[in-house]
Image: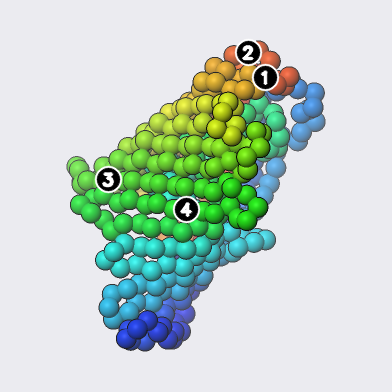
Amino acid sequence: MRKVLLTTTALIALGSVSAVAADVSVYGNTRYRYFAWSDDDSDPANQGYNNSSTGEILQLWTKATAETDSGLTFTAAARLGASQTDRNWMSIAGDFGTIRAGKDYLAAYTMSATECWMATIAGGYVAASSTGNSTATTDDGETRSRMDMSACGNTATPTHLMYTTPNIGGLVLKASYADAGGTSLADTTSLGAKYTVDMGGGSLAFNYTSDTVDAANEATATTEEENGEIGVSFSGGFGRAYAVNFSSKKTTNGSSTTSDQDGTEFGITYNVTDQWKAQYIRTDNTENSSASGNNRDEYGADTFGVRYHLPGDVFRVGILHKIFEYTDASGDQNAGAGSNSGSATRVELRMNF
């Protein structure tokens, strides 16, 4: 990725620390997406959809880094989207590790082994429906066919404080805490651990994540949520392969369970050449128990992808195609369409600058 580098002078007063020069870089990407899907949904409320859509994404990063004579590194970064600043944080790093404060992904998400975090082909998971409503085809990375969980876990970017340990013999730990504000008790505690060892010319990594969102208040209708992941991945010259077991449980204010799900996912991204990548992902998950009557509902999907980029990675074109099947064990899923199957495709053009 080519970056536009500007150099300014920033005076940092931290005790007797000398003034340092702060390097400021500006870079980003712009994307165009075409999305199409087809399924067996027969719910009259969902008929008449165009079954295709287009969209665009703009990401503009500004980042400033300065290092003191004592070895401390100060960083400030912000990512501007088409209509908002979706990530904005500052950090201080040294032999003690890294302390970061601001708006960004939580500890568990950044330690995940899944493709959701990597997004190497065409922006991560491809949805089976772009409508985002209650259809049985919803699968946008946050939702698995009315199973409101995915291997991605909690993808929110709240304002939080996070600590990352230094690398201790291959082990790195992360912990973050996000306060929900003065009108809500839905604070988020997020943890992650990753152990990496060199093996066979590549690196083998084991990871564990945990993510808890408290109930917003003491009312019986409020929900607390727990997400978790245990995974393993291997990266090398061929590309990357991973396998994870993930779970999600939602409880109504500490009493009755509203949703209890678990699933597995494995995938491989293969470097065909220096400019071509190919990908395969298999996802399965099951609703173990649910207050809405979706017990034993199952979801499975196969995703295939390919990507080409020009030398220097200035321009990319990627395609993801998903074939999915949703099985409604009760035969009547919230008076909706019940079992459903189909496919979805995303084409993404991306230019980095």
Residue at (58% x, 41% y) in the render:
215
Q: Nearer the viewer, mark 4 or mark 2?
A: 4
Identify the residue position indicated by label 2 in the image: 330
Image coordinates for residue 63, horizontal then vertical, percent: 47, 70
Foreground: 96 or 122?
Answer: 96
Image coordinates for residue 122, horizontal then vertical, percent: 52, 46
Residue 177 badge: 4
Identify the residue position indicated by label 1 in the image: 333
Q: How is the image coloured?
A: rainbow
Identify the residue position indicated by label 3 in the image: 195
Q: Are marks 1 and 3 in contact (CB under 8 Å)?
A: no
Q: Looking at the image, is 32 positioned above or below residue 342?
A: below
Q: Which amino acid does label 4 sit on?
A: Tyr
Secondary structure state at the residue bearing disc 4: strand
Foreground: 85 or 222?
Answer: 222
Q: Are marks 2 and 1 in contact (CB under 8 Å)?
A: yes
Find residue 339 and report its image quarter.
Answer: top right
On the rendered structure, is 111 left or right of 42? left
Q: Are marks 4 and 2 in contact (CB under 8 Å)?
A: no
Q: Nearer the viewer, mark 4 or mark 3?
A: 4
Q: Which of marks 4 and 1 is in front?
A: 4
The span from disc 1 to disc 3 (Cα, nearest Å) is 41 Å
Q: Are marks 4 and 1 in contact (CB under 8 Å)?
A: no
Q: Which of marks 1 and 3 is nearer the N terminus?
A: 3
The span from disc 3 to disc 2 (Cα, nearest Å) is 42 Å
Residue at (70% x, 42% y) in the render:
53
Q: Do the residues labelled 3 and 2 touch (CB within 8 Å)?
A: no
Q: What residue type is labelled 2?
A: Ser
Residue at (41% x, 80% y) in the render:
22
